[in-house]
Image (cartoon, grey):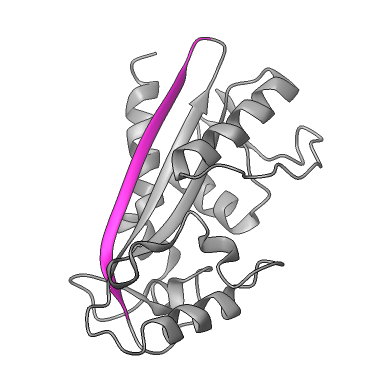
Amino acid sequence: MEIVFASNNHNKLKEIQMLVPKKIKVLSLNDIQFFEEIEETGDTLEENAAIKARAIFEFCQLPCFADDSGLMVEAINGQPGVKSARYAGEPADNNKNMLKLLKALDSFTNRNAKFQTVICYKSTTHEVYFNGEVSGEIISEMRGEKGFGYDPIFMPFGYQFTFAQMSQEEKNKISHRKKAIAKMLTFFDTL
């Protein structure tokens, strides 16, 4: 089975290629010669995932999927949420995003947060959504060199280290993206 992953994010692509069985070949946007930027104008993770999946399906007519992920922090009403990648403005900058979030949480003791991923799978016959979440807390300083995005300040509940301190294999066991991918793979078994 070949399926296109509708993202230019190479970190996400690597993660996803590790999560799917070898019998599924995950094609990148480069593989299908798609080089445009897809503007994410949705107000929710679901809307943004659908925008990307529909655009790529229209371009190549191959089964594809897109994800949109966000970090929702309780104390600040679920922010940065759907705006996670560009929380500190354009262009997207992981360090600036983390620094802005840490500053926003300065006066809060509740640092509970969750990462959420929504995947939209699009084919000729289906448009289906899969959700994955992992809960944890935002720590007060960046720790770890691995991962990407907010990984250095997100510590999942039950762990004493951040996503950025985990190996890719450790992170993939519990991550929001892994949970959403697992649901999509279960769906594929019904096709």
Is 157 situated left or right of 83 in this image?
Answer: left
In the depicted view, which residue is nearer to us: 169 or 88? Answer: 88
Q: What range of the chain is rendered magenta?
A: 125-138
Q: Is residue 129 magenta?
A: yes
Instruction: Give the quarter of the figure containing the C terminus.
Output: top left
Q: Is residue 114 above or below residue 131?
A: below
- The x and y percentages for residue 43 are 50, 45
| Image height of 125 relative to 1, above or below | above
Is residue 20 visible in the rendered structure shown here?
Answer: no
- The location of residue 112, given as percent across then percent down, is 25, 71
Image coordinates of residue 17 in percent, x first then y, are: 53, 46
Please give the name of the residue rendered at 62% of the width and 36% of the height, measured from the top-left corner.
52
Total labels drawn = 0
Q: Is residue 4 above or below residue 60?
A: below
Residue nearest the observer in this picture, 161 or 134: 134
Relative side of 176 to 164, left or right = left
Instruction: State which quadrant residue 77 falls in.
Output: bottom left
Name the image quarter holding residue 79. Answer: bottom left
Q: Considering the whole magenta stretch, tell me its main secondary structure.
A: strand
Give the answer, above or below, for where 106 lies relative to 85. Answer: below
Residue farthest to the top, as pictured: 125
Instruction: Please name the residue shown 41% across and 89% down the image.
Output: 141
Q: Residue furthest left?
A: 158
Query: Residue 187, how many percent across, how many down?
Result: 35, 24
Task: Name the image quarter holding residue 57.
Answer: top right
Question: Is residue 23 found inside the magenta-colored segment of the image?
Answer: no
Quarter that holds the N terminus? top right
The residue sitting at 51% across, 62% down in the picture is 84
Regarding residue 90, the answer to whether it shows in the image is: yes
